[in-house]
Amino acid sequence: MGKILLRGFIGIAPIAITITLLFWIYERLESTFGSFLKEIIGTKYYFQGLGVITALIILFFIGLILNNWVVQKIYNYFEKVLKKIPLLKTIYSSVSDLMSFFQAGEKQEKGKVVCCEIGELKMIGVVTREVFEDLPKGIGSDKEVAVFIPFSYQVGGFTVIIPKSKIKLVDLSLERGLRFNITAGNPSADKPTYSINN
């Protein structure tokens, strides 16, 4: 009886959490933009979901504007100013680095999933840095890379500076690589096969 209940909970939990999160995001967007729209157009022309549609349109145009090189120059200027403010620069840099993790089309190895060989151990991680020129001497060299190795079943992890000769590129997307670590390599969480390239 207990095992069946546990199996049912494990089966429904991911779906329930995902749906709950989507509803929470929907409610936040609708509440924030909806109340603003009601003040502008009135309740007569407002309908449920208009706030979310407005938020998506705004995000689309922001992305479109940021593609313009002039706007990018202005954005980069304010970013530099922001990074000089003691507390804000720490928060902004951390969030910015995390977001850049998921950007496609990186020219360097940044964001690539690799298998690290440390002694007899093999650990799956993600390359986060391969250039150390902007850091104090001794942290890394041109023959090393920084690899982030997430913990299983919790938010967190650790970063290792490891020789390039000790890592192998893994044929996994960033999403699947992180999922492998977060689920402790649970096969039921990642059905497709993968390979390690020498």
Image (tube, grey):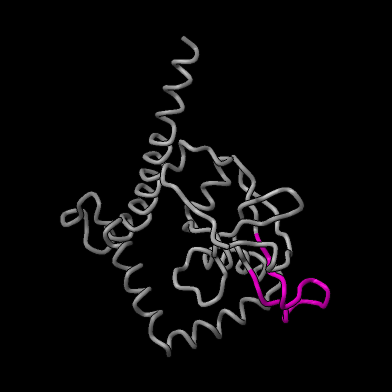
Front one among 36 and 186? 186
**Is residue 14 left or right of 82 when viewed as pictured?**
left
Q: Would you say residue 133 sits in the magenta stretch?
A: yes
**Is residue 95 left or right of 52 when viewed as pictured?**
right
Above/below status of 49 relative to 11: below
Tell me the chief SS of the magenta region: loop
Q: Quadrant of the C terminus?
A: bottom right
Question: How far across and how far down the image is residue 166, in percent?
Answer: 70, 62
Residue at the extreme front of the image, as rendered:
198
**Is residue 149 left or right of 192 when viewed as pictured?**
right
Front one among 197 and 189? 197
Write the residue at 51% across / 77% down: 107
Above/below status of 176 relative to 128: above
Write the residue at 54% across / 61% down: 197
Front one among 38 and 104? 104
Question: How far across and how far down the image is residue 40, in percent?
Answer: 26, 64
Which range of residues does the magenta coloring cover?
129-147
Residue at the extreme bottom of the image, as rendered:
70
Question: How far across and how far down the image is residue 102, in percent?
Answer: 49, 63
Above/below status of 151 relative to 69: above
Place residue 164 in its image quadrant: bottom right
Above/below status of 64 relative to 114: below
Write the residue at 72% across / 75% down: 143
Q: Would you say residue 195 sits in the magenta stretch?
A: no
Question: How far across and how far down the image is residue 160, in percent?
Answer: 73, 60
Label total for image: 0
Residue at the extreme left of the image, as rendered:
44
